[in-house]
């Protein structure tokens, strides 16, 4: 029986099926990490190493992966009253925990006149629920060992700040997750994949994504949720082709699913069958022909903007300009110069929250012109609202792939941007990636926001459904 670890708790909060696969499959069945994933992991390890260097730490010594010996060595350190224990091993009946740090506190326990609490070192800028539950998991194991539940747990964030929280606030949620993990460990079939934003970066993506396509799973449909999929399947609608022709008689037949939502999901199913976006009817007042597109490449770990680019006018053949700020102090002036190079008052089109959030964080300390922020227009929100797509879409890469049929990573993965700067051609690669993303945004604007509504006639819809049915039969035969 595989032991449940803190990593399983962490995974479960992100994706139930990810945790289930990790409980049943060996690490050798994961895809290999990419170069930039390895780079990010190393930065995390280096950050932890630098943080613990300043502490008087003790570490349990034991043969590699002999966790029973590691747990025994950790118990000795706990009883001896070591001030800090790094990479201790906490073992329970069916659980195994490897917390980053255990800190000694005054207060009686089965160890003596002292006890310990758990701290985990993270590279995020703020705490998340999955990180907190991981600490609570370790704390449960620690409490069983020392005969006392610590009052608090803590996360060390990337700025070195310690964020403490009450363990009691999260015990009920932890116990629910642990019970679910035990159920998944006993029955892998209790979990199924669901297409979501984290799938493209998951080490099981080459297993789950083909399986979803083979089954014509409802989660492939743009706008689908876990709840909507469950309701539709209970109503007998189990594939994308089923959904495209699903016309229930009344609320009960549709599982009381909202009628407006069902119509949009059905349109998403049709888009999937036809293999193209279906542009919706909407007011055409804002076309932004004279707008400029602004795009950032960032390093989230370092809280840095690595490159800022503009494309004006907002067409693929528009003029491209960019700045690569050398330091964080140069970022604000770089944006000001790029905006100053544009015609006064043109809309500043961007994708997502990166630009407005960055601008808001810096505006208080700078001589910010309120008129600049008023010109921001989020293309991401407008693109998602203006059409239904052949597949569920989450970020820019999904939109580029599904709406344009292009490789969104042809100039590289945005997650690799910080890594590029370690090479001689880093600046060139940043510029190429910026230009490619800006051109993709311009092409999406033209293909979706500037396009006429899509009219699908009965013959085209029937052809799409027939193609999907043939594909499903071929998949079943294979």
Image: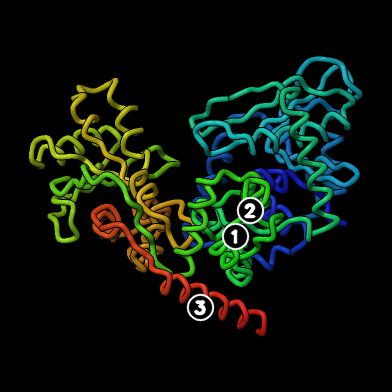
Q: Relative to 40, is 364 on the left or the right?
A: left
Quadrant location of residue 24?
bottom right
Residue 296 seen in the figure: no
Q: CA distance from mark 3 to mark 1?
A: 17 Å
The residue located at (82%, 42%) in the rendering is 179
> Looking at the image, which is closer to me, 153 or 248?
248
- Residue 218 marker: 1
- Residue 229 marker: 2
Characterize the local packing of mark 3: few (<14), some (14-19) or many (20 or more) Cα atoms within 10 angstroms. some
Q: Relative to 85, is 416 on the left or the right?
A: left
Q: Relative to 78, is 159 on the left or the right?
A: left
Task: Give the image location of residue 396, x and y in percent.
Answer: 38, 53
Q: Earlier in the sequence, mark 3 or mark 1?
A: 1
Characterize the local packing of mark 2: few (<14), some (14-19) or many (20 or more) Cα atoms within 10 angstroms. some
Q: Are marks 1 and 2 in contact (CB under 8 Å)?
A: yes
- Residue 8 marker: none
> Looking at the image, which is closer to me, 104 or 452?
452
Q: Earlier in the sequence, mark 1 or mark 2?
A: 1
**The C terminus appears in which quarter of the rendering?**
bottom right
Task: Give the image location of residue 21, x and y in percent.
Answer: 72, 59
In this view, 330 is above or below 284: above
Task: Give the image location of residue 307, x and y in percent.
Answer: 27, 47
Q: Earlier in the sequence, mark 2 or mark 3?
A: 2
> Looking at the image, which is closer to me, 19 or 63?
19
The residue located at (71%, 41%) in the rendering is 87
Q: Are marks 3 and 1 in contact (CB under 8 Å)?
A: no
Q: CA distance from mark 2 to mark 3?
A: 22 Å
């Amino acid at each position: 029986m595989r032991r449940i670890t803190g990593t399983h708790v962490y995974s479960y909060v992100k994706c139930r099926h990810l945790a289930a696969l990790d409980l049943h499959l060996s690490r050798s069945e994961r895809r290999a990490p990419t170069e930039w994933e390895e780079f990010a992991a190393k930065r995390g390890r280096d950050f932890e190493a630098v943080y613990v260097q300043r502490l008087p730490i003790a570490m349990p010594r034991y043969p590699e992966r002999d966790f029973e010996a590691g747990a025994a060595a950790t118990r000795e350190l706990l009883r001896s009253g070591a001030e800090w224990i790094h990479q201790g091993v906490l073992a329970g009946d069916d659980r195994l925990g490897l917390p980053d740090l255990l800190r000694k506190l005054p207060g009686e326990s089965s160890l003596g006149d002292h006890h310990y609490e758990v701290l985990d070192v993270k590279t995020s800028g703020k705490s998340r629920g999955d990180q907190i539950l991981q600490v609570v998991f370790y704390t449960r194991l620690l409490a069983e060992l020392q005969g006392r539940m610590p009052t608090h747990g803590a996360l060390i964030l990337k700025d070195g700040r310690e964020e403490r929280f009450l363990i009691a606030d999260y015990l009920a949620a932890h116990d629910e997750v642990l019970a679910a993990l035990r159920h998944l460990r006993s029955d892998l079939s209790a979990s199924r994949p669901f297409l979501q934003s984290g799938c493209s970066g998951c080490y099981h993506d080459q297993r789950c994504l083909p399986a979803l396509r083979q089954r014509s799973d409802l989660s492939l449909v743009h706008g689908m949720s876990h709840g909507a999929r469950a309701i539709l399947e209970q109503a007998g609608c189990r594939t994308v082709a089923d959904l495209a022709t699903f016309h229930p008689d009344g609320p009960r037949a549709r599982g009381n699913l909202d009628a407006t939502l069902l119509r949009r999901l059905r349109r998403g199913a049709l888009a999937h069958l036809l293999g193209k976006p279906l542009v919706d009817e909407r007011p055409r007042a804002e076309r932004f022909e004279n707008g400029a597109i602004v795009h950032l490449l960032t390093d989230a770990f370092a809280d840095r903007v690595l490159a800022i680019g503009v494309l004006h006018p907002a067409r693929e053949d528009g003029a491209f300009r960019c700045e690569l700020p050398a330091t964080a102090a140069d970022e604000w002036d770089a944006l000001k110069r790029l905006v100053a190079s544009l015609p006064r008052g043109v809309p500043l089109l961007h994708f997502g929250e990166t630009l407005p959030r960055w601008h808001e964080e810096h505006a208080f300390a700078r001589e910010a012109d309120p008129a600049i922020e008023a010109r921001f227009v989020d293309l991401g929100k407008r693109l998602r609202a203006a059409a239904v797509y052949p597949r569920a879409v989450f970020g820019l890469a999904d939109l580029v792939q599904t709406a344009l049929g292009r490789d969104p990573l042809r100039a590289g993965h945005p997650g690799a941007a910080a890594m590029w700067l370690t090479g001689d051609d880093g600046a060139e690669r940043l510029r190429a990636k910026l230009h490619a993303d800006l051109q993709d945004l311009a092409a999406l604007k033209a293909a979706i926001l500037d396009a006429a509504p899509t009219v699908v006639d009965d013959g085209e819809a029937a052809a799409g459904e027939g193609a999907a049915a043939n594909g499903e039969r071929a998949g079943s035969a294979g």
